[in-house]
Amino acid sequence: MTKPENFPSQPAFSLCVYCGSRPGARPQYSQAAEAVGKWIAAHGGQLIYGGGRNGLMGVVADTCLAAGGRVVGIIPEALRAREWAHTGCTELHIVETMAERKQMMIAKADAFLALPGGIGTMEEMFEAWTLSTLGYQTKPVGLLNLQGYFDGLLAQLRHCGAEGFLSEAQRDALQVGENPATLCEALVDSGASRP
Ligand code: AMP
């Protein structure tokens, strides 16, 4: 993808990022979140995320905003204080429920990317991925296996396949990469070219 000459009033794409509400134990996690935030801004895109200021969520949003990108945060009222809702977002949507939050994130995105994170990150990534395997949504889903963080999960998925519980088509519906910019580009390009 090339950077647009003049940023249009409409973003070039909307990338939904799922990631930890904690920073994780290694500086490389925050560095990857920064790389994703910068990549979205540099390509005239818009970040869709959970609307918090904590952990990697805050890092990706702050970096995207600082680089001139648009950021859309979506947070349930009940988590507003706990996740320290990011009032600097270009748009901050306060919703009632977690289900509403996930649904709005899915509706607004052209593609989904999961960075290292905890159970919330995995829950959201699995929902986007399973919905795509069932045909409820057709947008690409990616997993950034930074520093081997998801090696254990990927081994479990291979085990699911070997034991007959996961088809090749289902597995192939999840794009796995190790480089933030390369994976962002692949997801946004496949999101733009889907039928
Ligand atoms: P975590 O990866 O556990 O740090 O959580 C990352 C984000 O996922 C946080 O904004 C959580 O509020 C969110 N989250 C946690 N559980 C769920 C859930 N069941 N559905 C949607 N989002 C969730």
Image (spheres, rainbow, N blue to C red):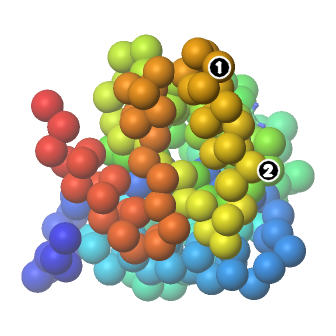
Give whichever of 168, 137 is nearer the camera: 168
Q: Could you say where residue 54 lies in the image, as x and y percent from the top left? A: 78, 65
Judge from the rendering whether residue 6 lies leftward or rightward of residue 109; answer left or right. left
Judge from the rendering whether residue 35 lies leftward or rightward of residue 3; answer left or right. right
What residue type is disc 1 on? Answer: Glu
Identify the secondary structure beneath mark 1: loop
Give whichever of 193, 37 is nearer the camera: 193
What residue type is disc 2 on? Answer: Gly
Q: Could you say where residue 80 lies in the image, as x and y percent from the top left? A: 79, 49
Q: Is residue 142 above or below residue 169?
A: below
Question: In the rendered image, which quarter is residue 122 located in?
Answer: top right
What residue sits 51% from the left and 39% below the top?
105
Check disc 2 and report the residue beneath it: 118
Q: Does label 1 point to a residue whose CB lies under 8 Å from ligand 1? A: no
Q: Between disc 2 and disc 1, whose residue precedes?
A: 2
Q: CA distance from mark 2 to mark 1?
A: 26 Å
Identify the secondary structure beneath mark 2: loop
What residue sits 16% from the left and 76% below the top?
2
Check disc 1 and report the residue beneath it: 163
Quadrant including the C terminus: top left
Front: mark 2 or 1: 1
Determine if residue 75 is in view: no
Q: Could you say where residue 65 lies in the image, as x and y percent from the top left? A: 50, 76
Judge from the rendering whether residue 37 lies leftward or rightward of residue 159; answer left or right. left
Q: Which quadrant contains ligand 1?
A: top right
Quadrant including the N terminus: bottom left
Q: Does label 2 point to a residue whose CB lies under 8 Å from ligand 1? A: yes
Q: Could you say where residue 166 lies in the image, as x and y percent from the top left? A: 55, 21
Label 2: how many Cα within 10 Å (few below 14, some 14–19, many 20+): some
Q: Is residue 78 above or below residue 188?
A: above
Determine if residue 120 is in view: yes
